[in-house]
Amino acid sequence: MPSEVSNPRGPSRQLKIVVGLGNPGFLYARNRHNLGFMCVNYLAREKRIPFDRKQAHARTGAGIIAGRRVILAKPQTFMNASGESVSALMKKFNLGPEDLIVIHDDLDLPLGKIRLRLGGSSGGHKGIESIIMRTGSPEFYRVRVGIGRPQLSENEDKENAIVSYVLSDFTPEEKKVIDATIPRVAEAVTCLLAEGITAAMNRYNR
């Protein structure tokens, strides 16, 4: 199975890439900005897919989810250059934007809320921005997971505050919410693979 997925011959519309966004390394492991990594790690454990390869600047694992062949990936390029890895993976496996699912944190959603969609702008997310730029298309699936926005004082520099917020760890109370959210993200991705975007949006965009 892994050898077939790692070296597909020609286009394979059955194969999908599920990417979790984050920053590599222990320093960032529990940051809010690493929520995509956390979600894809959970999905890998649930589906018994080990991250046993390094390719296209990513840690990857191959397996089956909802009857589909999948590559799970964690880019190791750091968030702002995620597109470098994602575009290389898509070229390696001869896939298009419609075969890509990206899981990422979202400041504009309340903590723990999930929203699935196809296409759209980056919403200011640097990882998504990089993927759109490097692949040349916004028409891929996104699984957005809310981390909320920080409370800012009047004189506080907004950009610096946002960077500090996303690169800091969840509080103990926030972690309880996130721990309950991550399994639902895995369910949402499985539903998307099994039933398509409309069914997944109807079920999880609440």
Image: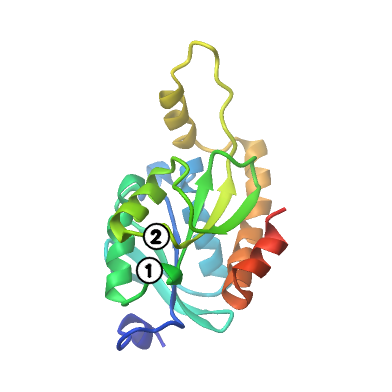
In which quadrant of the rendered view does residue 47 lie? bottom right
Give the residue number, with chain letter if any, for mark 2. Answer: 74
> SS for tag 2?
strand
Give the residue number, with chain letter if any, for mark 1. Answer: 60
> Is residue 162 or residue 135 the one in the foreground?
135
Camera sees residue 180? yes
Q: Residue 46, image x and y in percent?
A: 58, 70
For the point 45% across and 48% down, the residue is: 121
Q: Amino acid at mark 1?
A: Thr
Q: Residue 24, image x and y in percent?
A: 36, 50
Camera sees residue 25? no
Q: Residue 136, image x and y in percent?
A: 31, 59
Quadrant occupied by the N terminus: bottom left
Q: Residue 162, image x and y in percent?
A: 46, 29
> SS for tag 1?
strand
Does residue 87 appear left or right of residue 150 in this picture? left
